[in-house]
Amino acid sequence: GSQWDDVVLFDESYAFREHRSRWLYTGITRAAKRLTVVV
């Protein structure tokens, strides 16, 4: 899949309750250097 140096992930997993783990995993694994999670 696609990958970027810096990723900002807005934790809106409440909207994806059934797929929360997959949604977070996908977002987190896209970061090559830096990941910022906004909750």
Image: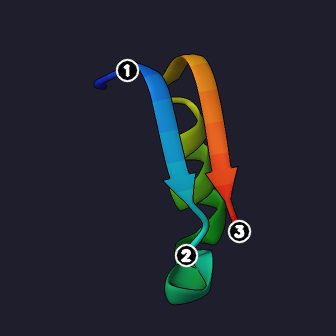
Characterize the local packing of mark 3: few (<14), some (14-19) or many (20 or more) Cα atoms within 10 angstroms.
Answer: few
Determine the residue positioned at 61% across, 67% down: 11
Which residue in the structure is indicated by mark 2? 12
For the residues marked 2 and 3, what is the alpha-carbon distance in whole angstroms? 8 Å
Residue 4 at x, y percent in the picture: 37, 20
Protein image colouring: rainbow
Return the disc, 3 or 1, that comes first in the chain's sequence.
Answer: 1
Q: Quadrant of residue 39?
A: bottom right
For the residues marked 2 and 1, what is the alpha-carbon distance in whole angstroms? 20 Å
Rendered view: 19 above or below 7: below
Q: Quadrant of residue 18?
A: bottom right
Label 3 element class: loop
Label 1 element class: strand
Discs 3/1, front: 3
Residue type, label 3 = Val
Residue type, label 1 = Trp
Residue 7 at x, y percent in the picture: 48, 34
Return the disc, 2 or 3, that comes first in the chain's sequence.
Answer: 2
Say left or right for 16 vs 28.
left
Label 2 element class: loop
Which residue in the structure is indicated by mark 1? 4
Determine the residue positioned at 59% across, 38% down: 28
Characterize the local packing of mark 1: few (<14), some (14-19) or many (20 or more) Cα atoms within 10 angstroms.
Answer: few
Rendered view: 25 above or below 22: above
Discs 2/3, front: 3
Which residue in the structure is indicated by mark 3? 39
Query: Foreground residue, 30 or 18?
Result: 30
Residue 17 at x, y percent in the picture: 60, 85
Characterize the local packing of mark 2: few (<14), some (14-19) or many (20 or more) Cα atoms within 10 angstroms.
Answer: few
Rendered view: 16 above or below 6: below
Determine the residue positioned at 51% across, 44% down: 8
